[in-house]
Image (spheres, rainbow, N blue to C red):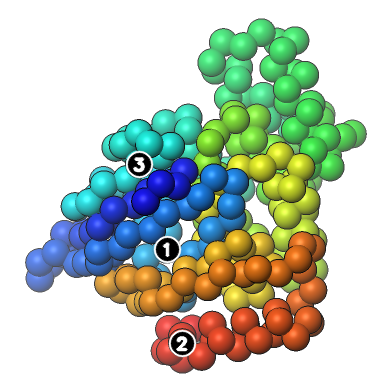
Amino acid sequence: MSGMIQCEHIVKKFPGVNGDYEVIKDISIEAKKNEILVLFGSGQCGKTTLLKVIAGLEPVTSGKIFINGKEKTAPGPECGLVYQTTVLFPWLTTMGNVEYGPKMRGMSKKERREKAQHYIDLVGLRGFEKSFPNQLSGGMRQRVGIARVYCNEPDVLLMDEPFGHLDAQTRYLMQEELERIWQTEKRTIVFVTNNIEEALYLADRVLVMSNCPAVIKKEFKVDLPRPRDYTSPEFLRLRQEITSIVDPAEL
């Protein structure tokens, strides 16, 4: 393996009443530089656990993880996380949330404001710099979250079903926006979802995960032009192919 993210023989177990409960079983994957790698599977199949392991938020039971060639054993600035529910500081404005990371690192006010403004513009929120989270829609709050992560300039973005709580129309819009943002400023993204259309719209590659203990059932390369058409014959063919290897009990 030689990617931006390398996971080698990852096993993750949690202690249980009747012994250890295995969530991840010997998974080896890689995410290449500037690609969008999607982890697709049912709820509770271990996708989020694998993401937390990559982020250094959960220790592995066995195996190793490398980010850009360096072993990952703890949280660090090389990884930025975007969660399913927006985790913004409610007492800070859009500008305050986006500039928070550089501010904590001691960056000057002028420099961090310029940097934050760049990413606020990138996610389409110019004019909302002074708005507080409770004054923004769900989609707008997720844009603030994305801008905040980008402002920290991580090598890797880890996204845990970030659009899962949005209504269908906003979800489609945010998928298009994320693709646009990624095209403008490339990052390596690992994106977790249980929505097959979302997986195929965003991914360079889709890794289909089984139920616990999770293994990678199959990898699909999504070699379709961007932006993608949900109704194109090739999109629908891939959708059917992925659906055919997912057991109904796993959906």
Q: How busy is the neighbourhood of tag 2: few (under 14 within 10 Å), some, or many (20 plus)?
A: few
SS state under label 2 = helix
Residue drawn 66% across the image and 86% down it? 237
Q: Amino acid at mark 2?
A: Ile
SS state under label 1 = helix
Furthest-front residue in view? 2
**Image disc number at residue 47:** 1
Does the CB distance between marks 3 and 1 fall below 8 Å? no
Residue on which disc 2 sits: 245
Q: CA distance from mark 3 to mark 1?
A: 18 Å
**Relative horizontal placement of residue 147, taking residue 74 as reference (left or right):** right
Along the viewing direction, whichever of 71 and 147 lies nearer the viewer: 71
Q: Compared to 220, does 95 lie above or below?
A: above
Kindly tell me whether residue 82 is visible in this rendering. no
Q: CA distance from mark 3 to mark 2?
A: 30 Å
Q: How busy is the neighbourhood of tag 3: few (under 14 within 10 Å), some, or many (20 plus)?
A: some
Discs 3/1, front: 3
